[in-house]
Image (cartoon, rainbow, N blue to C red):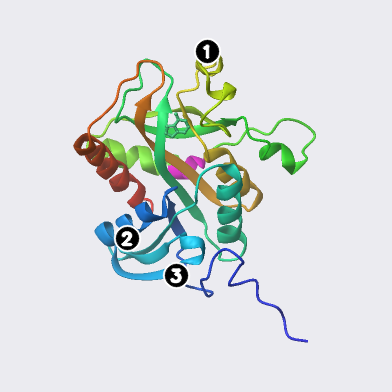
Amino acid sequence: MSAKSNVPTPHIGAMPGEIAETILLPGDPLRAQFIAENYLSNVKQFNSVRNMFGFTGTYEGKPVSVMGTGMGCPSMGIYSYELIHFYGCKNLIRVGTAGSINPDVHVRDMVFGLGACTTSNFPALMNLPGVYAPVCSWELLRKAAEKADALGLSYHAGNILSSDMFYGPAEGPEATQKWASMGVLAIEMEAAALYTNAAFGKANALTILTISDHLLTGESTSAEERQTSFTDMMKVALSLA
Ligand code: HPA
């Protein structure tokens, strides 16, 4: 009986060896395409299943991949699990946006997600005899901070919240205030699943965010300013390859 290969998976159409050990993970597959087209050389597309585009190329001569994850912990959970366990990815870097809930964290600021609190049940499903604390990789965080320092880019590093609700009571001002009172800096929707899967799969993960909106002040930003902060985040993320 021949061994049954795990790849392609139900969600990723790549063959073995087509995905680099370091992969950047934006939520939006078109953002993945934009990153591949604008930052990588020698690009080859490895996935189009469900239009969740994935590409591998090189950055400063080093292999790096980029793929969309979709929104929310279940979607991030599926893709990151398959990338780690079936394609051997070792460094998974989410690059995304978040809403700030801290008065000192402004629109366009860069945030490294040290820990990811969550309203998702994802970490609890690991069936541990207590509450798991999803955290980023110290190695990736250290490298990212050093790169940001070298480029003269400022950043915040702290706890973030991976919420399962974009609209609804878990996102109301009262809930936001409670998370803010515990020092949580910003809200996004995927880091807790990524960090939990990375821990289980013995891989390294980091979440790098730019603040797209401010949930306390209503502060917002122009498209041009968003592009500049996105470019800064990409310089840091790509240096991790
Ligand atoms: N909530 C959740 N995810 C987000 C937000 C938000 O306010 N802004 C950007 N991503």
User: Which is nearer the N-term, disc 2 or disc 1?
Assistant: 2
Q: How many marks?
A: 3
Q: Are marks 3 and 1 in contact (CB under 8 Å)?
A: no
Quarter of the image where one finds residue 143: top left
Asked which secondary structure carries label 2, the reply is helix
Q: Are marks 2 and 3 in contact (CB under 8 Å)?
A: no
Q: Residues within 10 Å of mark 1 (few under 14, many from 20)?
A: few
Q: Nearer the viewer, mark 3 or mark 1?
A: 3
On the rendered structure, is 63 left or right of 167? left
Residue 119 is situated, as x and y percent measured from the top left of the image, at 62, 30
Residue 172 is inside the magenta segment? no
Magenta-drawn stretch, dominant element (helix, strand or loop)? helix
Q: Are marks 2 and 1 in contact (CB under 8 Å)?
A: no
Quarter of the image where one finds residue 227: top left
> Which disc is residue 153 wearing?
none
Residue 87 is situated, as x and y percent measured from the top left of the image, at 56, 66
Which residue corresponds to the image point at 78% horizontal and 40% vertical from the top-left? 127
Stretch of the chain drawn in magenta: 136-140
Q: Amino acid at mark 3?
A: Phe
Which residue corresponds to the image point at 76% horizontal and 31% vertical from the top-left? 130
As rendered, which of 20 and 125 lies closer to the eye? 125
Residue with the mark numbered 2 = 36
Residue with the mark numbered 3 = 46
Residue with the mark numbered 1 = 181
Q: CA distance from mark 3 to mark 1?
A: 43 Å
Which residue corresponds to the image point at 55% horizontal and 42% vertical from the top-left? 72
Residue 208 is situated, as x and y percent measured from the top left of the image, at 41, 39
Q: Quadrant of the C terminus?
A: bottom left
Which residue corresponds to the image point at 26% horizontal and 29% vertical from the top-left? 221
